[in-house]
Image (cartoon, coloured by chain):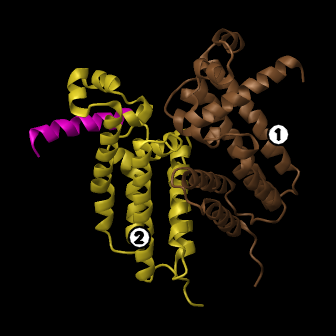
Chain colours: A brown, B yellow
Amino acid sequence: MGRGEQTRDAILETALQVASRVGLGGLTIGTLSEELDLSKSGLFAHFGSKESLLLRTLEYAEERFIETVVNPALAAPRGEPRLRALFERTLRWPQLVPQPGGCIFMAAAVEFDDQPGPVRDLVSANRKRWREFVVGAVRRAIDAGHFRRDVDAEQLGFELDGILFAWQHASRLLGDPRADARAHEAFEALVARARVRPRS
Amino acid sequence: MGRGEQTRDAILETALQVASRVGLGGLTIGTLSEELDLSKSGLFAHFGSKESLLLRTLEYAEERFIETVVNPALAAPRGEPRLRALFERTLRWPQLVPQPGGCIFMAAAVEFDDQPGPVRDLVSANRKRWREFVVGAVRRAIDAGHFRRDVDAEQLGFELDGILFAWQHASRLLGDPRADARAHEAFEALVARARVRPRS
């Protein structure tokens, strides 16, 4: 990794933390320059515009997500173990790559769902790739004989997202000390519904 | 209803629509005065500050939620039918009281979970009341013999919130035409898990 890339990554890591705390809308070249103690003009030279800063920050977040969540999950055995590894690592993602205000993608999904433009397009594309990845993992669990052939993989992807949103909501806004336990219980129930039933 | 209250309600209804579209953070006395073609000074006289405008808008939204979602659900028979009515009306809530950007409470829950202050306190209190109401409805379904005695009502409340978040996400950001059907399927699975099993 060259020095330019190291600088870029250090800047984007801070940008990600700021965006997680104040929302993507609150991430500006001004707030970032204060946080980093770098000149605004230097950051403008790097990013060109606020929109471009947001887009680069989201791209950086997706790179780190693939590296810290997706690739380790792919190292788990195909099928239910891989889906479980994916779920477990996703719960740890705001710690694995520091996001003090919680997962940037989930926050951006709500913040930008009604603001047409390149940022919304990128968030939407990211969330669709995530959904496809989950759905693919469910299909592999069907192929591996862990889940029933009639399991609706898209439905399972929908409900898994629900568990993640409810977990973020319960742990962050409601301050529920059992948020983690509840997310796990919901995941177990979801998987149990999909599993091949033992013959009686 | 006096004339003052009618004016207040008309202003707050517009404020709710603006907040739903651009987020609570984007709702200011300035944007609202443009939308309503009223003077800023007149609105300042009504609300005093931006923060007070946000608080009044959320209180107004909760009044309307009780009137259009909670009270009609309470008219349904106690137990599973009432929980179902609550779920169905909650899905229709952004149409029942126009919120073009989706449910204000769910958006505010994500937007303010990391911004300490009176707005976050009000959003958090509102979401806790909602959760308690759902949990209470589940407990009545246990008392009525519809749900098993060992059902964890808090867990069911957590998972119901997840379904609502996933539905908002799928319908608004992902543009999934099956979002409604998926929310219903998830709800049926949740209720089926809680139901008293027929004796075999």
Q: CA distance from mark 2 to mark 1?
A: 43 Å
Residue bearing mark 2:
B136
Residue closer to the observer: B140 or A172 = A172
| Residue at disc 1, secondary structure | helix
Q: Secondary structure at mark 2?
A: helix
**Badge 1 density bin: few <14, some 14–19, many ≥20, Cα 10 Å:** few
| A95, B140: nearer the viewer | A95
Question: Along the horizontal axis of the image, is B119 left or right of B183?
Answer: left
Q: Is residue A92 above or below residue B129?
A: above
Going by the numbered disc 1, the residue's amino acid type is Glu
Find residue A86 and report its horizontal and vertical position in percent: 76, 52
| Res A67 label | 1
Residue A173 percent location from the top left of the image: 52, 50
Residue A139 to residue B109: above or below:
below
Region in magenta: B1-18
Q: Residue A54 at what x, y percent from top left? A: 63, 25
Residue B150, quarter of picture: bottom right
Give the dominant element type of the magenta stretch: helix, strand or loop: helix
Decide whether residue B200 is among the magenta residues.
Answer: no
Task: Kindly identify the residue that appears in the image at 56 percent across and 33 percent down.
Answer: A23
Count every numbered label the image shows and give the total. Answer: 2
Mark 2 — on which chain does it sit?
B
Residue positioned most to the left: B2
> Residue A182 location in percent, x, y?
61, 64
* Chain ID at mark 1: A
Determine whether A75 is above or below B152 in the image: above
For the residue marked with disc 2, what is the amino acid? Gly
Above-or-below relation of A129 to B199: above
Q: Is residue A49 left or right of residue A149?
A: left
B17 left or right of A82? Answer: left
